[in-house]
Amino acid sequence: MSNGSDNLLEKKFTTLNNLVGWLVFAIALFVYYSTVEPTASFWDCSENLSIYYKLEVGHPPGEPFLQLLQHVVSLLSFGDVHKAAPLMNHAASTFSALAILFLFWTTTFFARKIVIRNGGLTDSNIYLILASGFVGVVFSGRGIGLGRVYMFLFFNVLVFYQNGAFRTQR
C-alpha cells in the first residue's frame, strides 16, 4: 500500500474510533441513567453515599480521592439531603459510562497495534478492531453493580489509556 492510502485508512480509523467510542458512551450513559437508584439502594452503595456526603472513613484503597470527588458532587445539593443521593448516583453513572468509553478506546488501541504488527490496516480490519472494542465493553460491563467499582475502574482505565497514548506520541 502506498503512504497516501495508509494515511487515509488511519484517518478513517481515528474518525470511526472516536464516533463509535462516543456512541458506546452515550448508550452506556443512557442505560445507567435509566436504571439509577433515586435514593440509597440496598447494596454497598448506600453505605458509600453516607460516607461521601459526611466525609467519613471509607474503604481503602483509592477511596479517599473518590470520597472527595463525590463529596464535591454532593455539595451541588446545597444542603438538601433528598437531592444528595440522586446526584451522587448520577455521578457514579457518569463515571461508569466514562469507564466504558476509555475501556473501548483501550481495547481498540491494543487491537490496532496487533493488526498493524500482523499485516497492516485495511478497511475490514478497521471494522474488526471496532467490533473487538464493542464486544470488550459489552462483556466487561455485565454484572458489576457497585458504583464505586466503576468509578475506580474509570481512573485505572484512564491511566492505562493515557500511558499507551503517551508511548505512541514519543
Image (cartoon, rainbow, N blue to C red):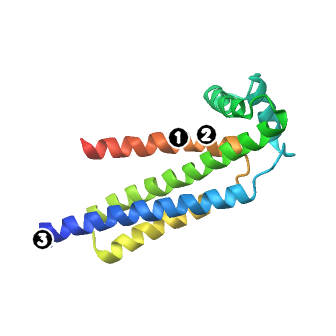
* Local SS, label 2: helix
Residue at the spot 55% in from the left edge and 49% down from the top edge: 98
Q: Which of the two residues, 86 or 68, is positioned nearer the viewer here?
A: 86
Q: Which residue is mark 1?
A: 156
What is the tally of numbered marks visible in this picture?
3
Please tell me the numbered disc located at residue 152.
2
Q: Are marks 3 and 1 in contact (CB under 8 Å)?
A: no
What's the amino acid at mark 2? Answer: Phe
Structural distance between the alpha carbons of marks 3 and 1: 38 Å
Q: Are marks 2 and 1 in contact (CB under 8 Å)?
A: yes
Q: Which residue is mark 3?
A: 2
What's the amino acid at mark 3? Answer: Ser
Q: Is residue 138 visible?
A: yes
- Quarter of the picture containing the N terminus is bottom left
Q: Which of the two residues, 153 or 114, is positioned nearer the viewer here?
A: 153
If you read the primary sequence from the N terminus, does the residue marked by circle 3 or circle 1 appear first? Answer: 3
With respect to residue 14, does 66 lie above or below? Answer: above
With respect to residue 153, does 4 lie above or below? Answer: below
**Callout 1 environment at 10 Å: few (<14), some (14 to 19), or many (20+)?**
some
Structural distance between the alpha carbons of marks 3 and 2: 43 Å
Answer left or right for 66 relative to 46. Answer: left
Q: Which of the two residues, 111 or 148, is positioned nearer the viewer here?
A: 148
- Quarter of the picture containing the C terminus is top left
Q: Position of residue 147 (x, y in %)?
A: 70, 45
Residue at the spot 72% in from the left edge and 29% down from the top edge: 59
Q: Position of residue 68 (x, y in %)?
A: 64, 26
What's the amino acid at mark 1? Answer: Asn
Residue at the spot 54% in from the left edge and 67% down from the top edge: 135
Q: Are marks 3 and 2 in contact (CB under 8 Å)?
A: no
Structural distance between the alpha carbons of marks 2 and 1: 6 Å
